[in-house]
Image: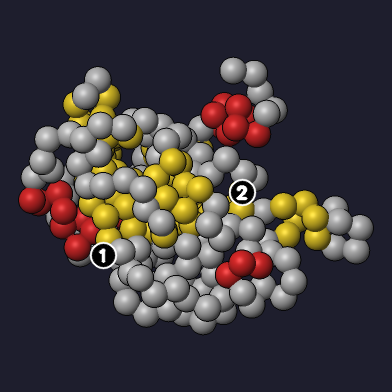
């Protein structure tokens, strides 16, 4: 990855304001929900729980998804989907814990926020969650689409770095407003801190997922 020119100061507000660029209450329910397709956040089997519209009161989270790594090793015969081994009381029990996170698209890192505290599974953490904000670039030009990964740890990129879809950028953690290791993925289109910002439903590039998991040819 290479370092782009300095990001405008306004862009850094995405993370400093805890991913709250605009209240979703400023908008009415859309007739048709817009979506963005991103590279899978992990190179593993995973499941996502999606937020219904306006379940959260700020744009990046209005249509966000909470994703966890899963394995088919649970139950008495090892054929049931599981989220963790043992009783799940340790972060290390969770399949998601420290799973490498992959960049959502070709773009630039517009902000990073770090919460050094790690949350115990089952207990809601405190403080702002660690997060990385990305802005999509096509042919080197911003598209106005932004994606944030939240509850991250071991971040390997810096603000201003350009990334390609699928580049390693961090690992899944458990910090801030979180009860267990997972990655929260939020997306929106528009200007930062603007009431005109539009929340986007997050969809996964299933062709890329097939290549990652070896179920599809390159």
Nearest the viewer among 184 and 131 is 131
Please give the name of the residue rendered at 51% of the width and 32% of the height, measured from the top-left corner.
205
Badge 2: few (under 14), some or many (20 or more) residues near its Cα, within 10 Å? some
Residue 121 in sight from this viewpoint: yes
Nearest the viewer among 198 and 164 is 164
Q: How many marks?
A: 2
Q: Where is residue 47 in the image (x, y as percent from the top left)?
A: 61, 51
Q: What element carries label 2?
A: strand
Please give the name of the residue rendered at 27% of the width and 24% of the height, measured from the top-left corner.
138
Task: Evaluate if marks 1 and 2 touch, with contact meaning CB atoms under 8 Å apart.
Answer: no
Please give the name of the residue rendered at 64% of the width and 18% of the height, measured from the top-left corner.
217
Q: Position of residue 84 (x, y in %)?
A: 69, 64
Can you say which quadrant of the picture contains the C terminus? top right
Residue 157 occupies which quadrant of the picture? top left
Please give the name of the residue rendered at 33% of the width and 69% of the height, measured from the top-left corner.
115
Q: Which residue is disc 2 drawn over? A: 46
Residue 31 occupies which quadrant of the picture? top left
Q: Which residue is disc 1 drawn over? A: 18
Q: Is mark 1 on a helix, strand or loop?
A: loop
Compared across the picture, whether 207 is left or right of 166 comes to: right
Q: Alpha carbon of mark 1 to alpha carbon of mark 2: how far?
A: 25 Å
Can you say which quadrant of the picture contains the N terminus? top left
Q: From what the image shows, is residue 27 above or below residue 202?
A: below
Compared across the picture, whether 11 is left or right of 32 comes to: left
N-terminal of the two: label 1 or label 2? 1
Q: Position of residue 2 (x, y in %)?
A: 25, 32
């Amino acid at each position: 990855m290479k370092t782009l020119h300095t990001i405008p100061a306004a862009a850094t507000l995405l993370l400093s304001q805890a991913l709250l660029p605009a209240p979703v209450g400023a908008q009415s329910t859309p007739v048709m929900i817009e979506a963005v397709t991103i590279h899978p956040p992990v190179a593993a089997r995973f499941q996502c729980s999606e937020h219904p519209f306006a379940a959260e009161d700020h744009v990046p989270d209005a249509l966000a998804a909470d994703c966890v790594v899963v394995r088919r090793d649970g139950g008495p015969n090892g054929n049931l989907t599981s989220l963790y081994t043992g009783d799940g009381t340790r972060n290390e029990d969770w399949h998601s814990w420290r799973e490498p996170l992959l960049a959502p698209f070709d773009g630039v890192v517009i902000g990073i926020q770090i919460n050094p505290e790690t949350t115990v599974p089952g207990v809601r953490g405190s403080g702002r969650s660690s997060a990385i904000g990305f802005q999509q670039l096509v042919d080197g030009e911003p598209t106005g689409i932004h994606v944030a990964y939240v509850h991250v740890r071991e971040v390997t990129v810096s603000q201003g770095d350009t990334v390609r879809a699928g580049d390693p950028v961090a690992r899944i953690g458990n910090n801030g407003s979180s009860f267990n290791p997972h990655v929260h993925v939020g997306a929106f289109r528009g200007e930062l801190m603007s009431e005109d910002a539009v929340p986007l439903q997050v969809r996964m590039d299933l062709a890329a997922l097939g290549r990652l998991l070896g179920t599809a040819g390159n």
